[in-house]
Amino acid sequence: APAPISNFIRQVIDADLASGKHASIVTRFPPEPNGYLHVGHAKSICLNFGLAEDYTGLCNLRMDDTNPEKEEDEYIAAIQEDVQWLGYQWQGEVRYASNYFDQLYAYAEELIVAGKAYVDDLTPEEMRQYRGNLNEPGKESPYRSRTPDENLTLFRQMRDGAFADGSKTLRVKIDMASGNINLRDPVIYRIRRATHHQTGDKWCIYPMYDYTHCISDALEGITHSLCTLEFEDHRPLYDWVLNNITIPAHPQQIEFSRLELLSVVTSKRKLRQLVEEHLVTGWDDPRMPTISGMRRRGYSPEGIRLFAQRAGVSKTPNVVDFASLEGAVRETLEEASPRVIAVLDPIKVTLTNFEPGVTGSRSAPFHPHHEEWGEREIPLAREIYIEREDFAEVPPPKWQRLTPGGEVRLRYSYVIKCDEVIKDSAGMVVELKCSLDKDTLGQNPVGRKVKGVIHWISAEHAIEAEVRMYDRLFTVARPDAVRGDDGEYVDFKQFMNPASLTVITGYVEPVVRDAAPETRYQFERLGYFVTDRKDHVAGGKPVFNRTVTLKDTWAT
Ligand code: ATP
Ligand code: MG
Ligand code: MG
């Protein structure tokens, strides 16, 4: 494998290992289990697990589960499956921030006793007013001067359910005049009677994200805590909490820019809308930029990892064209996918001088570079199908495919000549009558050159398959950043591509019938296709998803 490209995070790690600050590294991937992971998370997974791999360190998987209402077991299971499918394994058991609720609670008492946290009775609205804004300092809450004893009693009563939801909070005492709003006495606990998927009804108070995250990192011995740039101005709070409690470790938070992939949306909240409004078939719809959607579409883990590596790590905006995701996927599928022939938009061709009993073709390898994958016979018959777009009644300049009176080679077989075009009453071409040149199997015709080669399939041997042709889910690059005349954002769902899914019946070689779900093929000249993970059953009528075309055909 090529040496990894250095980046600013690697430089920090290199320095920390060189100075002996750490003997080895521990990273973590900390999703909130409130939806399925998307391509942006894939970047973070590849970064965190990839660094651990490269530096022979470890990476934890931690569910950041401090919002019980929005979280579900289904998401927890899907997250684990997605990480493993990408090819990574976390250290030990899956962690949960909720595993640390007891410790988090004890640290909160430590802060109270030290006079660094207080119970506040301000309403959320009052708290907003008191907090101030960037142009004016905040005001101190009248409850800020409660004594440690009073606070300890109140906090324990909060825990024991003595107060109504939302009626009190625990805040840390930092600086109401700070230029960083995050340091104006942030709330670290709120009262919320909600059943938690891990801790049930044990707690009616839940810790806030900023307070939980740094302590969870420290308890797990994380050395480098990588997060996206919007947390840059939360870092002083991350450090403040760890500096003010008795905890032996102090991980370093390092921020990098979020991946934004064009032509899709990368926000769980927006992806959820598509699912809930039935605009897609589910989180794993092959058009979705979720990891499970990309998987079902036929993208390979290697392709996604290559894409993430190329997207790079920096603090500058990471806006990447969809074509570069497709390009990375295509590159990894090229070597890995057996070739078969399919005709997806057929015209019938009758070979008028075909004689039953002739072999008709040579056997064809499943891959030009993988002899070990073997070969299969491609039977010829009197009736075959070719692709409608391989015939032109009035050919454009430099046309090398079939045309009336013209010749073309059938891939792995003979040269044929189009003698007659048959149309229906509407003028649509329904059949071509062709003759084959019997001296051209495995050799050039005598006295003339035939340049074009087209794929074809024997009508009597082919089997029908359901083929789902996918295209971009949105018609604009940034569906969630379009503003209307009033200056407000337009609903991103208005930009969904009505042609993002077309279901057709195609003709494929019989060998694919027995393929397991999630088997990838290249259909020669057409693109990469995969048997659907859910709807394809080995031995039944095949169901294929188009993963990506052979070339980038998207025009913007
Ligand atoms: P979303 O807004 O889609 O819910 P999130 O950041 O709230 O994203 P989390 O589940 O909290 O989602 O994210 C888990 C990890 O993945 C975090 O460390 C986060 O920084 C990272 N991550 C999420 N989205 C991206 C992205 N677009 N690019 C890079 N990393 C991301
Ligand atoms: Mg988050
Ligand atoms: Mg979020």
Image (tube, rainbow, N blue to C red):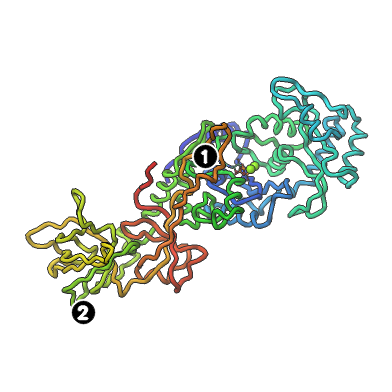
Which residue in the protein does label 1 denote? 260
Q: Nearer the viewer, residue 297 or 27?
A: 297
Numbered disc 1: secondary structure: strand
Query: Residue 457: which quarter of the image?
Result: bottom left
Amino acid marked by disc 1: Glu
Pointer 2 with pointer 1, Cβ within 8 A = no
Residue at (22%, 59%) from the top-left corner?
A: 453
- Crowding at dot 2, Cα within 10 Å, few <14 / some 14-19 / many 20+, comes out as few
Say which of 469 and 110 sits in front.
Answer: 469
Sequence order check, earlier mark of 2 and 1: 1
- SS state under label 2: loop
Q: Can residue 186 be seen in this view?
A: yes
Whether ligand 1 has any atom under 8 Å from the Cβ at mark 1 is answered as: yes
Q: Which residue is drawn at 35% across and 65% down?
A: 373
Q: Is residue 17 above or below residue 394?
A: above
Real-space CA distance between mark 2 and mark 1, rounded to the nearest whole angstrom = 58 Å
Q: Residue 357 carries which label?
A: 2
16, above or below 67, in the image: above
Q: Name the side, left or right, on which 501 lies relative to 490.
A: left
Ligand 3: give its quadrant.
Answer: top right
Q: Nearer the viewer, residue 405 or 536?
A: 405
Q: Which residue is drawn at 54% across and 44% down?
A: 265
Q: Where is residue 454 in the image (x, y as percent from the top left)?
A: 25, 60
